[in-house]
Image (cartoon, grey):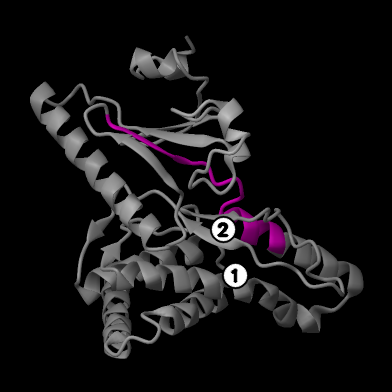
Amino acid sequence: MSPDLSTLPSAISDALDLTLISQGAEAKIYFSHEHPFIPSTLLAGTISTTISNPSAGYILKYRPPKRYRHDALDAQLTKHRTLSEARILYKLFLAGISVPSFIAVDPRLGLIWMENVDGPSLKEWIWATETELEEHLCEEGESGQSKKRLEIIKPLLLSVGSEIAKLHFLDTVHGDLTTSNLLLRDGSSLGAEGATGSHQRMVPQPVIIDFGLAQQSTLPEDKAVDLYVLERAFISTHPIHSGEYVEWVLEGYVAGFGRGKKTAVFKVNEIMRKLDAVRLRGRKRSMVG
């Protein structure tokens, strides 16, 4: 058994070929080409599943035991947090929000199975797109058109804002919205292929991942904090054009919040008002240290 799998229940690690791909304070993320229940021979046949692309593989999120906690307390917290995350993920999936397809959960063992989204993160995609645009502009000497060319990123960020709006309209707060927790599907490639050419470039679909800190909330301020966390992520990882990026995300958010619902305009205006207040608090903290 690989050392990476040493803390997984043996019934899981012995039965499936798993690879550790990331590890955080609360959970470990494993990848597998094997479905946890359905043999690959059946998946390749006529069996229908909710997985959009079975060949992309599957993700296992595992909350390992915390040895510093009392066993009974640790078991209770693991069960509660795993079940809460799974319920939110399944609810959003059923509501048509762009999230990984939910497969199964074992709250007692702290396991959640879901589809693997085979694509780059929003952060990686923007970095690569910016780099390619800069190289093209240097070659062509078209510095005056830099902002115009940068707007190839706009349709994607409008879509990101719209997906977050759908999430918030269901009174679900993510808790850790960053450009790393937004993946891109539908064969989205790193870089801006077609961006500087004459042919149309397909806009990838953003997928929201990692609901470990998510919760249900009707409070406009909680949703505003979600947006503020994403805004700070843009400032941190894409500082040069963060202003435009945040503006486009918020444009998509306002346009996509509860489309056609009578109360949507009032709710989204209140969230935007709270966002201004959250920003002000953030600036004050920065000033006083």
Is the residue 41 above or below the residue 102 in the image? above
Q: Is mark 2 on a helix, strand or loop?
A: helix
Amino acid at the residue labelled 1: Leu
Left or right: where 197 falls relative to 19: right
The answer to whether residue 30 is above or below residue 118 is above
Name the residue rendered at 47%, 60% in the picture.
98
For this orientation, the residue located farthest to the top is: 1
At x 49%, y 13%, the residue is 2
- Could you tell whether 148 is left or right of 287 in the image? right
* Mark 2 crowd level (few <14, some 14–19, many ≥20, 10 Å Cα): many
Q: Mark 2 points at which residue?
A: 122
Residue 91 visible in the snapshot: yes
Which residue position is annotated with label 1? 156
Q: Residues within 10 Å of mark 1 (few under 14, many from 20)?
A: many
Magenta residues span 110-129
- Number of numbered discs on residues: 2
In this image, 13 relative to 90: left or right? right
Judge whether residue 287 can be spotted in this image.
no
Task: Write the residue at 50% across / 23% down.
Answer: 18
For the residue pair 96 and 241, the one nearer the viewer reads as 96
Image quadrant in which the C terminus is located: bottom left
| N-term-proximal mark, 1 vs 2 | 2
Magenta-span inclusion, residue 188: no
